[in-house]
Image (spheres, rainbow, N blue to C red):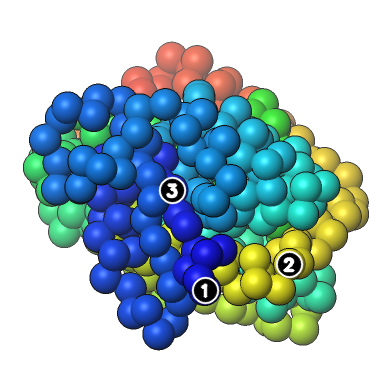
Amino acid sequence: MENNTFNVAVLGAGNIGSEVITRLLELDKGIVGLNVKKVLVKDKSKKRAISADILVDNFEDILNDESIDLVIEVLGGIDPGKEYIGALLKKGKAVITANKDIIADAGVDLIQTAKENNSCLYFEAAVAAGIPVLKPLIESLRGEELSKVLGIINGTSNYMLTSMEEGSSYDDALSTAQELGYAEPDPTNDVEGLDAKYKAVILSLLCFGVSPSSDELFTDGISGITKEDFEWAARLGKTIKLVAQIDNKDGFNARVHPVLIDMKHPLAAIRGALNAVVVEGENINQLVFSGPGAGAEPTASAIIGDVLSACHQLSSNQTNWYPLREFKGEMKSFEDVESSMFIRLSVNDEPGVLAKISGTFGENNVSIESVIQEGRGDKAELVLVTHEAPEKDIKNSIDQISALDSVTTVTSTLRVYV
Ligand code: HSE
């Protein structure tokens, strides 16, 4: 710190980096004195609205600049950002990152590095962007025993699902999401649940002290959802959301997949590109955090909040981390998680078909809660909802049912949030 002013460097000047720099320059000096001293870019000759005097293209220029107190990493991807963050923390610089991939991959180690070097690490923007939910989890709720976290933590897929609920096809919803800049030209990470998976790993760490591995965190996206699924959902008083569910009741399990959810549930009201995180615990009952979860502006807001916290911490020379939660309980594999399943089938409309299907569920110890059948000529559409049963038993039932001669197609399977 020089003359009551913190020197800041920014790694990356893309959409988010540029927005952050603008906000830093506009920040009321009465709150904190900040000087944006260096910005790391790949190509200094590219035209930008940032003064050329502060552009650098060599990370070492920032790492070895003793006057820089605080570094904001907005490069995207794991490499080289992960290595940069580690090196900066070891130099005692405060680091703020929006990078969920890095924190999901190496959060525990980086937090440890920050502690060991009396530096600080903040990553509020990595989960649910504009919603300040991590700070309450790290600080305000650190004394609480949590039992469950539910989240709509991908804005792009929620935007698309909302459009489909309003009648769009999947392809139209995706094109509009791309036109509006929510979805990337390659939308895989958002629509296949991978972005939500990284965020679920971070929430698992902060809420339950465990980082599930990629194999342990079952992930399914929204690319198989159709308009017809929404029509059925509406008939059942439900909608469809891509939800990260993390619970530690009878064993710990984290998963990300679409669910049919009751219209009265708080998550059903989260529309468009908004995100929401629901946190449950014995003393707090249920807390709901909601707001904009994607986009440069909300992401920059979370980063600015972290900058203020980091400046406060640098002034008081303390770490921002209480001990991470200690994992209590046991890992539960996804195949042992109990789910209620909505299953839509096209079957031959002939005697005995329903008996064979219900018999197959019975043999696998899966109980059926409701059945609707609608004639379609010599075919019938059959919609079943099961009671909660272990995933492995439901999967075996569906595999056996789809092999029956009288079953033409298993059109869709969706878990029901109960
Ligand atoms: N692509 C993400 C989303 C935002 O749509 O929520 C960044 O994590």
Numbered disc 1: secondary structure = loop
- Judge from the rendering whether residue 258 lies leftward or rightward of residue 377; answer left or right: right
Where residue 206 appears, as percent x and y from the top left, is 70, 57
Residue at the spot of label 1: 4
Neighbourhood count class around disc 3 (C-alpha, 10 Å): few under 14, some 14–19, many 20 upward: many
Q: Which residue lies at the image location 50% right of the left edge and 15% below the top edge?
A: 403
- Judge from the rendering whether residue 162 lies leftward or rightward of residue 79; answer left or right: left
Where residue 413 appears, as percent x and y from the top left, is 44, 37
* Foreground tag (1 vs 2): 1
Taking the view exactly as shown, the residue that stands out farthest to the front is 3
Q: Earlier in the sequence, mark 1 or mark 2?
A: 1
Residue at the spot of label 2: 317
Q: Picture quarter containing residue 376?
A: top left
Where residue 389 appears, as percent x and y from the top left, is 69, 45
Q: Which residue lies at the image location 51% right of the left edge and 29% below the top edge?
A: 60
Where residue 80 appears, as percent x and y from the top left, is 50, 25
Q: Which residue lies at the image location 47% right of the left edge and 21% below the top edge?
A: 402
Neighbourhood count class around disc 2 (C-alpha, 10 Å): few under 14, some 14–19, many 20 upward: few
**95 vs 270, nearest the viewer:** 95
Q: Earlier in the sequence, mark 3 or mark 2?
A: 3
Which three-letter amino acid code belongs to the residue tagged 1?
Asn
Neighbourhood count class around disc 1 (C-alpha, 10 Å): few under 14, some 14–19, many 20 upward: few
Residue at the spot of label 3: 9
User: Does the beta carbon of the residue at mark 1 sit less than 8 Å from ligand 1?
Assistant: no
**221 vs 25, nearest the viewer:** 25
Whether 198 is drawn above or below 252: the answer is above
**Viewport quadrant of the N terminus:** bottom right
